[in-house]
Image (cartoon, rainbow, N blue to C red):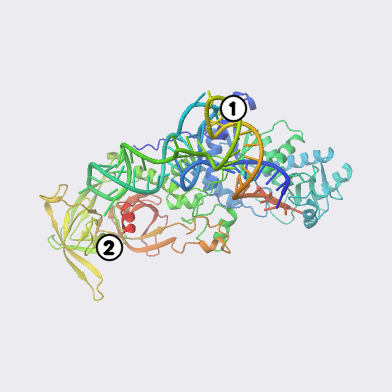
Amino acid sequence: MSKNASVTPTNFIRQIIDEDQKAGKHQGRVHTRFPPEPNGYLHIGHAKSICLNFGIARDYPGGLCNLRFDDTNPHKENQDYVNAIKEDVRWLGFDWGDRLFYASDYFDKLHDFAVELIRNGKAYVCDLNAEDTRAYRGTLTEPGKESPYRNRSVEENLDLFSRMKSCEFADGERVLRAKIDMASPNINMRDPTLYRIRHGVIHHQTGEEWCIYPMYDYTHPISDALEGITHSLCTLEFEDHRPLYDWVLDNISIDCHPQQIEFSRLNLQYTIVSKRKLTQLVSEGHVNGWDDPRMPTIAGLRRRGYTPGSIRTFCDRIGVTKADNSVEMGILEACIREDLDSNAPRAMAVLNPLKVVLEDYPADKVEELTASNHPKDEAMGSRSIPFTREIYIDRADFLEQASNKFKRLVAGGEVRLRNAYVIKCESVIKDDNGEIIELRCSHDSATLGANPEGRKVKGVIHWVSATHGIKAEIRLYDRLFNHHNPDGDKSVESFLAHLNPESLRTLTEAVVEPSLLNASAGDRFQFEREGYYCLNAEPSEQGRLIFNRVVTLRDSWAKIEQQS
RNA sequence: UGGGGCGUCGCCAAGCGGUAAGGCACAGGGUUUUGAUCCCUGCAUGCGGAGGUUCGAAUCCUCCCGCCCCAGCCA
């Protein structure tokens, strides 16, 4: 087969781990984690992180990768997201074994460490409201001011924190802060908030047990350490937070200190990979849910017909670095084409039918022709296709007259019907508006599995029996946005302005070969000369099969056509 | 203008002082009952710029330029 033999990716993170292994760091262990917040569905950018973290665990001896939900903000999170995320990670082909965790598993310990910080004079309860806190923080170029509550006694802090925990205070009335340095050039170190008060939310894991919730910057390093993580991989925007990550672990009694390493997040052209904006697309109804086949979510890609392997290949190919990037869709598309080219059985489907009557073929005759399911893989077997007097071809495969570059059917010309005979167009029938409604053709009975005598027929087109074909609905998906960077265009009020109105075109009159009646939901086929299609889980309102277009075939004819 | 990062082909990306991998895209050609696949071939005297060190620099040093991130009681 082709050379999609996966090359084990190498990247700067694996190099660091190699060196750590050589130096005997972490007792030689390699333990990563994938830490999603359950506040939305996973997208292709998360796939990059999943492949990185689980891929490293897979490739190093004894390597492990935990799945941990970062569920410290119950306001935005829920169990549906937890379930969807688990399904997506599993579908991508990764296994967390018995290591499914929640940051909320550690709420008790997190609380105790906070008490320890207070006891050591390294955290304090602050009564400043959100607005004042911001004002005291200073700006990027000016240092902040110390909170008037910064030097409370340990006893008072202990008492206040305990009362925060027992819900004596309202939301926003007090927070627990680390006592670090209000003049730090790194804003994250200007006494960051560790705990805030949140009443009236029911946490999907802990219910109403808590009314104080720890912040990410405090929770993450401790969760990592508690799980014995060796390498904590995250995206570049957390680079500034690393000093805080280290500060937390250096100031509590814990004997594990994972190494945080940052890599750049994925940017994919013609789409968005911002959870906030994807949420907006869903909630405002611009798409039909998180798993809409146009969405760059894992669930969307799955429904679209992408395979887990193709997404893993994609993640291997784009690599992992710290450089800002803007990956072309073409790379993702090439990955799924490669996979499906070797693995998807072939079939014939006519998307825009044009009737062809073979005048020299008996009306009641049905020939069962044999077609191979894959041109290069005999093991995929063959199927039979009924051939009859009336068939459909695609309207795009006929032109009354055309330049000799056009290798399909023209008036008076010949063309090969894929897996069948060579036919010749004898006459063209039009309606009152001059629109072509039918072709009358003849066939050469000597051309089944043989080249015609004394002449060359250069074109091959696909077809489906008009009497045996099955009506189907075809959904033609295209890019969701018509701008390469919808999120980055400042000349427009919102990324929504770049939504592609033609991202979904539905064809309701398509006709597919009858063998497709045996297909199951999710089965993928190459409709020859058209592209790769995936059978939708549900039929259409009329009870017809629905096929979703995964991706078109490469089309060099389209290029030639455009140029002329 | 404070701090933290990043700049190698159109895009992604190797390279780690010994003379610019690979993939995608693109352009030619061959095979083909899919204008698909497959197979050849081509595609950076050049690594953001300028100096310097060195026999030798994308790799080391200096300065400059450009881009990204940070002022949530979000993650």
Q: In which quarter of the image is the C terminus of chain A?
A: bottom left
Residue B72 drawn at (x, y percent) = 72, 52
Q: Name the residue under label 1.
A: A19
Q: Which of marks 2 and 1 is nearer the N terminus?
A: 1
Query: Badge 2: few (under 14), some or many (20 or more) residues near its Cα, within 10 Å?
Result: some
Q: Mark 2 points at which residue?
A: A395
Q: Nearer the viewer, residue A455 or A88?
A: A455
Residue A200 drawn at (x, y percent) = 73, 57
Q: Which of B3 and B58 is in front in this view?
A: B58
Q: Which residue is drawn at 45% across and 47% down?
A: A332
Residue A36 drawn at (x, y percent) = 60, 46
Query: Badge 1: few (under 14), some or many (20 or more) residues near its Cα, within 10 Å?
Result: few
**Residue B7 lies in quadrant:** top right
Residue A443 drawn at (x, y percent) = 14, 57
Q: What residue type is labelled 2?
A: Arg
The image shows residue A272, relative to residue A265, as above or below, that is: below
Q: Nearer the viewer, residue A349 or A45?
A: A45
Q: Quadrant of the N terminus of chain A?
A: top left
